[in-house]
Amino acid sequence: MGDLLTREQSDASVAQFQAEFDQRGYGWWAVEVRATGGFIGFAGLDQVDDDMPFTGVEIGWRLARSAWGQGYATEAALTVLAYGFDTLELSEILAVTTATNSRSQAVMRRIGMTRDPADDFDDPTVPEGPLRPNVLYRIARGAGSRRDRREP
Ligand SMILES: CC(C)(COP(=O)(O)OP(=O)(O)OC[C@H]1O[C@@H](n2cnc3c(N)ncnc32)[C@H](O)[C@@H]1OP(=O)(O)O)[C@@H](O)C(=O)NCCC(=O)NCCS
């Protein structure tokens, strides 16, 4: 996921996230643990990079290692999906990760996204190596995320 950011780089990222919210109404939300308010990472929506061989809005997530394995990414992702479909009225949401990132792909499947191997692609911005092969997951509005199927 790149190098550790300096405080200045991190602050610049937050300013960029805020500007994106102001401009287009979506971006990367902070994820906090309800019980403690502790900050554990972020989740949200972003425009697919121009370099990619497809266009659209993608969902993503990144949590501190200590917060893995507790369902926090899935819980946050379901909230983000609901925002994308119900508030932004997107017709489809995409998700991209490396073919080797099984934890991220597991989150995609848990929230109801599906992968067509025909959509697999090599990230043109990454040099030859294990991070270059990528997978694409999709979910269409109305497809029924896990949240929709949950009993009231
Ligand atoms: C991708 C990432 C967010 C996934 O985090 P995660 O904790 O594995 O995902 P979830 O929050 O869905 O948690 C699932 C785990 O919690 C468990 N869990 C406990 N309670 C749960 C609940 N209520 N709901 C769902 N899962 C629950 C699951 O059984 C699963 O356990 P397992 O890891 O032993 O299989 C995390 O690995 C990460 O930040 N990676 C680095 C950044 C990254 O790769 N981002 C994606 C780039 S595309």
Image (spheres, grey):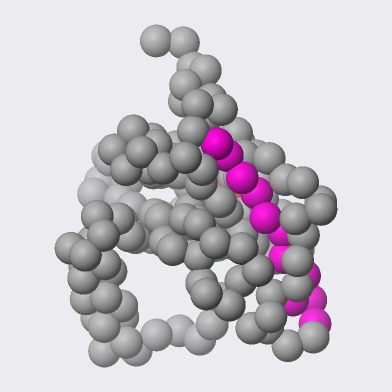
What is the magenta range? 129-140
Is residue 12 depicted above or below 117 in this figure? below
Q: Residue furthest top?
A: 152
The percent coordinates of residue 11 (x first, y second) are 24, 80
75 left or right, relative to 6: right
22 left or right, relative to 33: left
x 62%, y 54%: residue: 104
The picture quadrant where one finds residue 97 is bottom right
Task: Answer whether residue 24 is magenta in the image.
Answer: no
Is residue 62 depicted above or below 128 in this figure? above
The percent coordinates of residue 40 (x first, y second) are 37, 58
x 26%, y 67%: residue: 20
x 72%, y 58%: residue: 135
Evaluate whether residue 131 shows in this view. no
Q: Which of 122 and 151 is in front in this view?
A: 122
The percent coordinates of residue 67 (x first, y second) are 46, 53
Evaluate whether residue 6 shows in this view. yes
Q: Nearer the viewer, residue 117 or 108?
A: 117
The percent coordinates of residue 58 (x first, y second) are 50, 56
Q: Which of 152 and 136 is in front in this view?
A: 136
Predominant SS along the magenta part: strand
Is residue 50 depicted above or below 141 in this figure? below
x 41%, y 42%: residue: 90
